[in-house]
Image: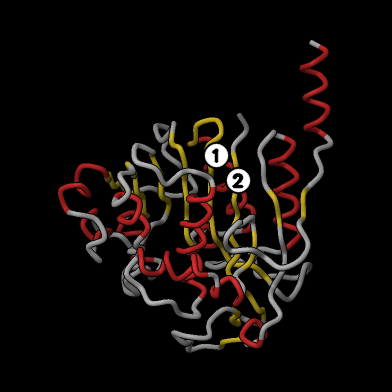
Amino acid sequence: MMLKSLRQLTRLFAPVVIVPGEASFAQPVSQACTYNQMLDPLYAQWCHAIYENPSTHRKQWEFCYILQALETAGMLQPGRRGLGFGVGDEPLTAAFAARGIGVTATDLDTERAAEQGWVDTDQHARSKEVLNGRGLCPPEDFNRLVDFRFMDMNRIDSDLRGFDFCWSACALEHLGSIDHGLRFIEASLECLKPGGVAVHTTEFNCQSDDKTLDNASTVLFRKRDLIALARRLRRQGHDIVLNFDLGDQPLDLHIDVPPYAQENHLKLQIAQWVTTSYGVIIRKAG
């Protein structure tokens, strides 16, 4: 009884861990997209693994960051099970299946996705076959290893449990509010085994830790939102480490404005805010 009480007390006062200095691509924590990470040889390896040439675009960084985070956590092994949220037409589902990983991929149903503009912009998964559009995985293996269903990220299906890892790439900022996005991150952990890993990327407000874009079709998370999330998660016994380095190279200081470019797109302007991609890595308690 005393040992249990001591553990509960330790969790209650578990401090948030914020790592100072430059963010590392090879040993990622929860961190923002920066130019120097794209110079790491591992970045190029992951680009080639998803049949892309390395570019200076934050969306590509998100894919490579998720892959590297899961590789570092020991999750990209045959026989593992992964759960993808809001997968759209991204290459990650097929990349995981190509490594012998069983995947359940989910996306918003077609009617609601069309209402939000995801269908017209080709950012929605209409069917399972779309997820292997690049041919990353042999079709017979893909069909055997991958399941697909429509699902609202604000209401995760209760039967999605027991996964080794889960992920989402720039989807949770479209759930209606900052609060909804943070609740989704916490809810995604319920889908994992003890010791499982969640990796999510989202929009990060580089400009203000006070005023931001909220209660909109796209919201911008602030440093304080992520610290509050980390504090709650650590009190529950989960592991999360934060880094808020935004880079100091010329491209880190460049702000892309609409219509956005296919290169030199690390920081961008949304409404009056400067934002970039931020990745969150959580190891579930247990």
Question: Nearer the viewer's eye, disc 1 or disc 2?
Answer: 2
Instruction: Tell how many labels.
Output: 2
Picture residue at 77% right of the left edge, 55% below the top = 18
Image location (x, y in percent) of residue 254:
63, 87
- The amino acid marked with disc number 1 is Leu
Does 94 sit above or below residue 195? Answer: below
Kind of element beneath mark 2:
strand
- In-image side of 65 versus 88 (left or right): right
Disc 1 crowd, CA 10 A, few/some/many (<14, 14-19, 20+) = many
* Relative depth, front residue between 3 and 175: 3
Q: Residue at x 42, y 49 (%)?
A: 152
| Outermost front residue | 41
Residue at the farthest left position = 140
- Labelled disc at residue 189: 1
Q: Earlier in the sequence, mark 1 or mark 2?
A: 1
Q: Residue at x 30, y 49 (%)?
A: 97
Q: In the picture provided, is 65 more to the left or to the right than 251?
A: left
Q: Could you tell me residue 81's position as x and y percent?
A: 38, 39
Instruction: Determine whether the residue tagged by mark 1 lies in a helix, strand or loop.
Output: helix
From the image, tell me which residue sits under label 2: 282
Residue 93 x, y percent position in the rendering: 34, 54
Mark 1 vs 2: CB contact within 8 A: yes
Q: Nearer the viewer, residue 212 or 125?
A: 125
